[in-house]
Image (cartoon, helix red, strand yellow):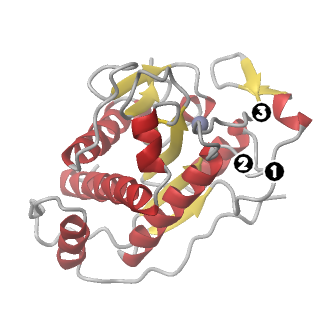
Amino acid sequence: MLRNNLKFRGAVFRTCSAAFVLVLVSAGIPPVPPANAETNVAGRSVFLDPGHSGVNDSAISSQVPNGRDGTKDCQTTGTSSNNGFPEHVFNWDVVLRIQDVLQGLGIHTGLSRSNDNELGPCVDQRAAEANAAHPDAIVSIHADGGPPWGSGFHVNYSSPPLYPAQRGPAMQLAGTIRDFLSGAGFRKSDYVGNDGLYGRADLAGLNFAEYPAVLVELGNMRNPGDAATMETVEGRARYAQAVTNGIVAYLQQTTTEGS
Ligand code: ZN
């Protein structure tokens, strides 16, 4: 049903250094010149996964491989804020914002689902689509449904690693996105993970990933403070900008290192 949902578009080539500075300035983060002024992210590719789906039915509880010789539900509904703002809407909105900026930099993007009003693919299928795109990075966007007293973001990575990309590259991607979220003023989680990072073995999308992959829980929708930020356009734009800056910085790092 969603085999045509890879939306790689023609690259828009720009001067990366100028575009990157604009990205950083708009986020209120002091721009840091790339180590190599010739570094350009145009032509790189990023697969974006807006977590969950706009619509669900009983099929979401069908069992699919979890990437570690077990099974798990095809999909889950996701959480919502106490005001009833659904996580899938938040995820979709943030991912579109990330995609817009990445495409403006000439970065090819793919999406795991094509809209926010249909049943989307199972978690294992999303992982397969991500791998098929051979991207430089895979970034899944979520919001958590944690304890009401807990707040802040955390970036999940596969642990223990199953593929080479799940070792250094995924850790580097996770750490870079963590640093840019923190640098943009978002708090690291005070209820899960360690220093804004969380190694997990139970996320199929990360287990199957043959390319550097992270799953970002941008905040806790059950926490009134986090939810207040997530429920506003301005808050979602800030989250998206910070994640985008982290992705771009990671791409620049890996270009510089030739990896
Ligand atoms: Zn979620």
Residue type highlighted by circle 1: Leu
Q: Is residue 193 left or right of residue 252?
A: right
Verify CB contact (< 8 Å) between mark 2 and mark 1: yes
- Position of 217 relative to 203 (above/below): below
The answer to which of marks 3 and 2 sits earlier in the sequence is 2
Quadrant placement of the N terminus: bottom right
Disc 3 to disc 1, C-alpha distance:
11 Å
Ligand 1 sits in which quadrant? top right
Front: mark 3 or 1: 1
Residue type highlighted by circle 2: Ser
Say which mark, if any, is on residue 74: 3
- Position of 190 relative to 83 (above/below): above
Mark 2 neighbour density, 10 Å: few (under 14) some (14–19) many (20 or more): many
Say which mark, if any, is on residue 119: 1
Confirm whether residue 237 shows in the render: yes
Disc 2 to disc 1, C-alpha distance:
6 Å
Verify CB contact (< 8 Å) between mark 3 and mark 2: no
The answer to which of marks 3 and 1 sits earlier in the sequence is 3
Mark 3 neighbour density, 10 Å: few (under 14) some (14–19) many (20 or more): many
Decide which of 169, 217 is in the foreground and name it: 217
Give coordinates of residue 234: x percent, y percent. 39, 62
Front: mark 3 or 2: 2
In the image, the residue with mark 1 has its CB under 8 Å from the nearest atom of ligand 1: no
Residue type highlighted by circle 3: Cys
Decide which of 33, 218 is in the foreground and name it: 218
Give coordinates of residue 258: x percent, y percent. 24, 53
Confirm whether residue 214 shows in the render: no
Residue at the disc numbered 2: 53
